[in-house]
Image (cartoon, rainbow, N blue to C red):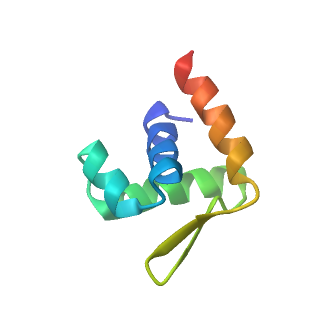
Amino acid sequence: MADRRLQVFCSVARLLSFTKAAESLHMTQPAVTFQVSQIEDHFKTHLVDSTHNKISLTAASPCALERAEKIRKT
């Protein structure tokens, strides 16, 4: 798993916004959405629910976020 994808997921999870994560990472919002989608496909689980411009984390997200942050620190 590419470190950039983990960084993108961590930003989205912390900010609860694809747009704010994109701004903080100097990326486009579609690129951020694509990166998170790739992580979800890789792990075969949804990590972020997005409805009507509101983002919420799924039950799997806290564990994934904790592990992603540990990997990024190493």
Horizontal side of 4 relative to 6 (left or right) equals left
Front residue of 45 and 55? 55
Q: Quadrant of residue 65?
A: top right
Front residue of 35 and 66? 66
Q: Dividing the image into 4 quarters, which one contains the N terminus?
A: top right
Q: Position of residue 26 (x, y in %)?
A: 23, 46
Check the image and report above or below for 3 versus 35.
Answer: above
Count how many numbered circles sit on residues in the image.
0
Q: Position of residue 73 (x, y in %)?
A: 54, 19
Q: Dividing the image into 4 quarters, which one contains the C terminus?
A: top right
Residue furthest top as drawn: 74
Q: Position of residue 39 (x, y in %)?
A: 58, 50
**Residue drawn 51% across the image and 43% down it:** 10
**Residue drawn 76% across the image and 59% down it:** 59
Q: Quadrant of residue 53?
A: bottom left
Front residue of 37 and 55? 55
**Residue drawn 70% across the image and 47% down it:** 62
